[in-house]
Amino acid sequence: MIKSVILSTLVASSVFAFSVQNAQNAQNRTLQAIGKNSVSESNFNEMHYGHSRRRSQMTVELFRTGSGQIDPLAVGKAVSNPQGTFNIRPNKCYSAPQFAAVKMRGSNISKGAFMVCTQSGCTGLCYSYPMSQGSSINELWNIFGSRWAVSYSWISPYF
């Protein structure tokens, strides 16, 4: 009789503990789904970064104009009017204020290409620049036919 009481108590406590654990897991999944890092709000390309030891980053400096007053970025002139400096990861699109020149720096950035587009979300008219050719693009105003670039991406098949 005592054995059956102990056994039934163990079974009941195990069932209770299992149901409490499932309820907590369900609550965590619900909270995560509405949070900023949920699967529905994250990009597919970012999912592997949480477990990767080797995070490649590029530092990008965006510039609005050059030293010429008529042409927003005259070829061969020094870039000026910085829009900001950003650390980016490969294979992800970034939106930015209007810019006409880009300087890039970082380790392992000579692989892949740098894509710049005239519309947000890396859409519209786009220009792809092979990273093996250098680390700056300073004629985007002319390339896009007197239009600003507003989005960019470092395209790298190696990461």
Image (cartoon, rainbow, N blue to C red):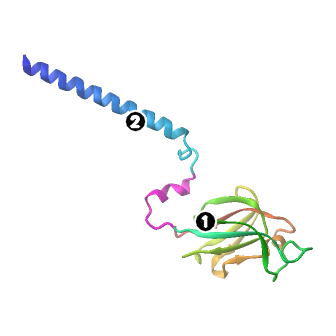
Start-end of magenta stretch: 43-55
Amino acid carrying label 1: it is: Asn
Q: Where is residue 89 in the image (x, y as percent from the top left)?
A: 58, 64
Vertically, is 153 above or below 111? above
Residue 136 as seen in the image, left or right of residue 41: right
Amino acid carrying label 2: it is: Asn
Q: Residue furthest top?
A: 1
Q: Nearer the viewer, residue 47 or 23?
A: 23
Q: What residue is rendered at 50% in x and 37% in y? A: 31
- SS for callout 2: helix
Residue of label 1: 87
Vertically, is 145 above or below 8? below
Q: What residue is rendered at 13% in x and 23% in y? A: 6
Residue of label 2: 25
Vertically, is 92 above or below 14? below
Residue 153 as seen in the image, left or right of residue 32: right
Q: Do the residues labelled 2 and 1 touch (CB within 8 Å)?
A: no
Tell me the quarter of the picture where residue 77 sits: bottom right
Secondary structure mostly seen in magenta is helix
